[in-house]
Amino acid sequence: MNEALLNRIGSFLDKNPTLKGTPATAAQLAKAEQELDIKLDKDYRAFVERFGGAYAGIAIHAFNNGASVGNETIIDLTLNGRRLFNDAEMFPEINESMVFADDGAGNPVAITPEGKVVLFDYDTEEKQVLASSFEEFVENNFSEW
């Protein structure tokens, strides 16, 4: 992930500590990959290894999230998203994706195996590509206040 962007986020989070989590460990990341049967995106890994679950224009979940981010882990979010869409027989690709956020209305925001960031919208039954990569997604959403 772009070091300049990570430094900007780091400076912002240093001034807003409730938005920064505890960095993810190798054991937590390995457990998530095993439990979810996926390979985590390299840019997502770089982000959470540095900031944990943190705010970067949107709440990005990991394992030990910032107090203002919420308690749900990526395992929780992903399994809940899979259950929801498998029960509704929608978006089978969610079973190969990792959910790291939601859109504020409960719709999962995920990283696909190809690295795209997508929104799975339950109400409209549409999948929207939000960015071609996690890095691009963060660049498009993050701004210091």
Image: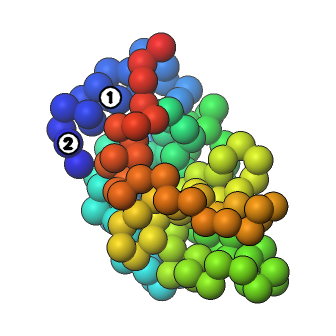
Could you tell me which residue is drawn at 35 percent across and 37 percent down?
139
Q: Name the spot of residue 2 as percent of width and height, x first.
A: 20, 42
Q: Is residue 84 visible?
A: yes
Compared across the picture, whether 85 is left or right of 5 comes to: right
Task: Residue 108: give x, y in percent of width and height.
Answer: 65, 59
As shown in the figure, which amino acid type bears the numbered disc 2? Answer: Asn
Would you call the spot at circle 1 few (<14 residues within 10 Å), some (14-19), or many (20 or more)? some
Q: Residue 47 location in percent, x, y?
A: 34, 47
Kindly identify which numbered label has been placed on residue 2.
2
Residue 100 placement: quadrant: bottom right
Residue occupying the far left of the picture:
3
Which is nearer the eye, 6 or 25?
6
Where residue 43 appears, x then y in whole percent? 30, 55
Say whether residue 86 is left or right of residue 62: right
Label 1 SS: helix
The residue indicated by pointer 1 is 10
Please tell me which residue is depicted at 40% across the width and 63% down the height of the picture: 116
Q: Name the kind of residue labelled 1 in the image.
A: Gly
How far is the residue under mark 2 from the one under mark 1?
12 Å
Residue, x 61% and y 66% (percent of image)? 127
The residue under the point 71% across, 43% down is: 104
